[in-house]
Amino acid sequence: MGNPIAHSKSPQIHAAFAKQTGEPIVYQAIFVERGQFSRALDKFQHAGGKGLNITLPFKQEAWSLAQHRTQRADRARAVNTLWFDEHGERYGDNTDGAGLVRDILINHGGRIKGDDLLVLGAGGAARGILEPLLAEGPARVVLANRTVSKAEELIALFGDLGELWARGYDALSGEQFHLIINGTSLSLRSEVPPLPNEVLAPGGWCYDMMYADEPTAFVRWGNAHGAAKSLDGLGMLVEQAADSFQLWRGVRPDTDQVIHALRSK
């Protein structure tokens, strides 16, 4: 469930997982009007739905509607995976951050430990990735957001886990980062946050949590500013989807073949 949702590759991914594992599932994308998420969730559950993923802009609302939540979901106060037990109780988890870290470190051979990281945005997407990122031991993580107070809210939630700072975009001048992660939805509108030209350190990487059939605006920005690698979030999407699939069905699919198939289309 999300808004927008037409661009989502999740149905293709879960169909591939189902075929690979022999699990009999049907997975569909559901567009939900803003303000209608709770009603849509009730309708899905009452119709016999077993579980679902949540994307922008409903992750924080999904957290509030789950009766049982994992520790990492509670820390993020955002949920991207829901499922129901035989009594209709709702369970919520957040697999976003684990998917991001796995894609950077394993799929692309990147590094987080000891590096300076910049995370753009302070919404549900950023909430879901901060705990796993900080667990990898970066030198520091700076959160940049148009409204600095929203970034400061996340400092209060995650600041005990590592060096975490809040900035407005205009305060980034003179700073450089080894890895810049775009957690805003601006790429869906072909826009990029207002970043200083020199903010990416030499040899640094860019990572857009959004994805598209063509390079996103932030991936293009990274390439234009000399990134050693500028990546979109397709690998993260597949990795978090595999974790969700395991929560629902008890088996984790192989992700390499699915990522390769999606990239080659």
Image (spheres, rainbow, N blue to C red):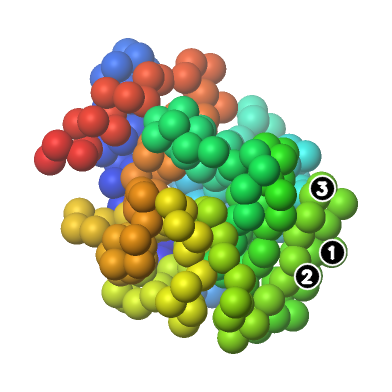
Q: How many residues crowd around disc 1 within 10 Å: few (fewer than 14), some, or many (20 or more)?
A: few
- Residue at image coords 40%, 35%: 108
Query: Is residue 147 depicted above or below 53 in this figure?
Result: below
Q: Residue type at mark 3: give it.
A: Leu
Residue situated furthest left in the rendering: 265
Task: Quickly name the residue at label 3.
Answer: 161
| Residue 55 in view (yes/no) | no
Local SS, label 1: helix
Residue shown at 51%/70% (left/top)? 199
Q: Is residue 10 in view?
A: yes
- Residue at the (60%, 56%) spot, across then down: 117
Tell me: 71 left or right of 144.
right
Three-letter amino acid code of the residue under disc 1: Ala
Q: Residue at x 72, y 71 (%)?
A: 166
- Work out which quarter of the rendered image holds the N terminus and state it: bottom left
Query: On the image, numbered disc 2 is attached to which residue?
Result: 153
Cα distance, mark 3 to mark 1? 10 Å
Q: Nearer the viewer, mark 3 or mark 2?
A: 3
For marks 3 and 1 on the same chain, the one whose residue lies earlier in the sequence: 1
Which numbered disc covers residue 156? Answer: 1
User: Residue 154: percent from the left, percent from the top?
Assistant: 75, 64
Percent of width and height locating residue 48: 47, 38
Q: Amino acid at mark 2?
A: Glu
Estimate how packed mark 3 is, as few (under 14), some (14 to 19) or many (20 or more) residues with alpha carbons within 10 Å: some
Mark 2 is surrounded, within 10 Å at the Cα level, by few (under 14), some (14 to 19) or many (20 or more) other residues, namely: few
Comparing marks 3 and 1, which lies closer to the viewer? Answer: 3
Residue 247 vs residue 151, the one in the foreground? 151
- Pointers 3 and 1 in contact (C-beta within 8 Å): no
142 sits to left or right of 235 = right
